[in-house]
């Protein structure tokens, strides 16, 4: 059924309103347009009827009304004249829904809506201010639950897949690029200058907005907020636990603004627990469990309770198949601690692959390297000497954006894993893929990035979740 709507228009705002309405009109509405002077519009369809007379004349206005007109919009420059039109319409019908341009209601009327011009103009100016979120004003509850955000260069969201972003209480619905809209897909990679359409709780979206607009130095966001170290005293020696804590403290010092949780499992020595607790500050908390639940359940609970964004653990925990599988499902980065020391680190290395996986972790690699004040090293291993030129160009572009140091090593001889084994002072950064959840490893002679470096200790290694 077609809904008949009365429009009483006068002035520049009314003209602009009519022009936009003609562009967005639907076949479900028809319009009676009344104005004191003819309004020029070239895009009005057959669903618009125009009448030119003084709408403050009761006899002329009432003569045009009919019972099937249930809605009226009064957009007039002269507020007094707008009030006169309102009274005429209300004398005709007490139930007609009326929208009036003005800042003061003529009387208490539940079927009257006021649209004030000043807030509209102010809101439009706010939208023009850089780095201010654009929220929906046409649909929803108008409280910021629908937001549009443009990704700046250097953002932690740039060059990430949508699926690699943890989205709790909010969602990326669509992406706009070069005037085209793309529905959100897990495999879609976000780029600088893309605009994201977000839906979620207003308070959560504001935090997401700030995170998108922040430049490097945000890791482990957007995976989570905090660092969580897991030490299991039933399978790790006191020396290994002390080493893991020492390396975690170094990271915590460099990842500013994050909280570090040290979770001690199966502890049986109160003296050691008291010693570890002396490290506690407002940004460091020690959690001791003498009789621990399964680690997989603890990891799952901590993702929510501790907002874990980076999990730290040694090899004997990470090699457990169910642990890796849980971490992969939780979409959380893992720093598998080795025997090396961050204090002597000389770079963060990314091994290039034949696909696009290394590009998907490029922004994280530069972010981590920047916080640790290290260069990014690209290890371009190509036995057939077909080097990854496009991927190197991608990293080179990011290096300029982040103003970071980039070193490229090209070789067709030395396997990446063997190279890393001989350079324990380098942090290896790898994609965290589903292949890594397999029960068996293929050893140091595989070139598959998802299985590299799982079966030897050596240097520290960071595994970053990606969406394939």
Image (cartoon, helix red, strand yellow):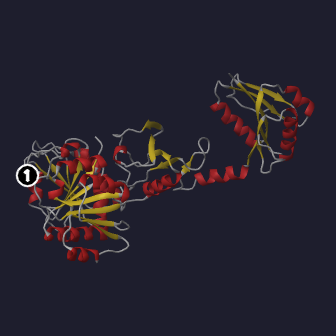
Q: Is residue 270 left or right of residue 222?
A: left
Quarter where residue 22 is shown: top right
- 116 or 179: which is nearer to us? 116
Q: Is residue 329 left or right of residue 352?
A: right
Q: Where residue 328 sits: x, y (%)?
A: 26, 48
Q: Is residue 359 left or right of residue 413?
A: right
Q: Is residue 334 left or right of residue 221?
A: left
Q: Residue at image x 39%, y 55%?
A: 155
Q: Where residue 449 sits: x, y (%)?
A: 17, 47
Q: Which residue is mark 1?
A: 414
Q: Where residue 243 sits: x, y (%)?
A: 17, 70
Q: Residue at image x 88%, y 35%?
A: 91
Quarter where residue 42 is shown: top right
Alpha-carbon neighbours of circle 1 within 10 Å: few (<14), some, or many (≥20)? few
Query: Eyeballing the image, is 239 above or below 18?
Result: below
Q: Judging from the image, what secondary structure is the residue with disc 1 in? A: loop
Q: Residue at image x 17%, y 48%?
A: 321
Report how many numbered discs are placed on residues in the image.
Answer: 1
Instruction: Kindly tell me whether residue 344 is visible in this rendering.
Output: no
- 326 or 250: which is nearer to us? 326
- 404 or 302: which is nearer to us? 302
Q: Residue at image x 51%, y 55%?
A: 203
Instruction: Kindly tell me whether residue 434 is visible in this rendering.
Output: yes
């Amino acid at each position: 059924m077609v809904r008949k709507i009365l429009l009483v228009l006068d002035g520049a705002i009314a003209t602009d309103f009519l022009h936009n309405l003609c562009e967005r009109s639907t076949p479900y509405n028809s319009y009676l347009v009344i104005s004191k002077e003819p309004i020029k519009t070239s895009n009005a369809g057959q669903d618009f009827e125009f009448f030119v007379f003084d709408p403050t004349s009761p006899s002329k206005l009432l003569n045009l009304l009919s019972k099937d007109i249930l809605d009226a919009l009064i957009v007039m420059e002269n507020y007094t004249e707008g009030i006169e039109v309102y009274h005429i319409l209300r004398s005709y019908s007490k139930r007609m829904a009326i929208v009036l341009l003005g800042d003061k209601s003529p009387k208490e009327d539940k079927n009257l809506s006021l649209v004030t011009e000043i807030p509209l103009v102010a809101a439009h100016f706010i939208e023009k201010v850089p780095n201010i979120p654009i929220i929906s004003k046409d649909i929803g509850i108008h409280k910021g639950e629908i937001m549009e955000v443009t990704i700046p260069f250097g953002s932690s969201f740039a060059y990430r897949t949508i699926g690699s972003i943890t989205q709790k209480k909010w969602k990326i619905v669509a992406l706009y690029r070069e005037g085209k809209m793309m529905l959100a897909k897990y495999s879609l990679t976000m780029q600088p200058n893309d605009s994201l359409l977000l839906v979620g709780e207003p308070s959560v979206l504001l935090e997401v907005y700030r995170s998108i607009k922040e430049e490097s130095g945000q890791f482990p966001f957007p995976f989570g907020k905090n660092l969580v170290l897991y030490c299991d005293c039933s399978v790790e020696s006191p020396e290994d636990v002390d080493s893991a804590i020492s390396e975690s403290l170094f990271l915590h010092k460099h990842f500013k603004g994050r909280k570090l949780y040290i979770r001690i499992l199966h502890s049986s020595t109160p003296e050691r627990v008291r010693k570890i607790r002396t490290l506690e500050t407002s940004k460091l908390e020690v959690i001791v469990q003498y009789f621990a639940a399964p680690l997989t359940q603890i990891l799952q609970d901590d993702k929510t309770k501790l907002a874990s964004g980076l999990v730290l653990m040694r090899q004997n925990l990470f090699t457990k198949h169910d642990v890796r599988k849980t971490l992969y499902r939780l979409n959380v980065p893992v720093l598998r601690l080795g025997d090396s020391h961050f204090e002597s680190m000389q770079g963060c290395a990314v091994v290039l692959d034949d696909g696009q996986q290394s590009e998907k972790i490029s922004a994280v690699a530069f972010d981590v390297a920047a916080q640790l004040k290290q260069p990014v090293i690209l290890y371009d291993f190509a036995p057939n000497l077909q080097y990854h030129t496009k991927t190197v160009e991608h990293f080179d572009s990011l290096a300029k954006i982040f103003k970071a140091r980039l070193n490229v090593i090209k070789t067709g001889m030395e396997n990446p894993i063997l190279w890393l084994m001989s350079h324990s002072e380098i942090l290896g950064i790898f994609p965290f893929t589903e292949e890594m959840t397999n029960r068996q490893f293929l050893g140091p002679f595989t070139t598959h990035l998802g299985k590299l470096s799982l079966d030897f200790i050596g240097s520290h290694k960071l595994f970053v979740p990606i969406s394939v």
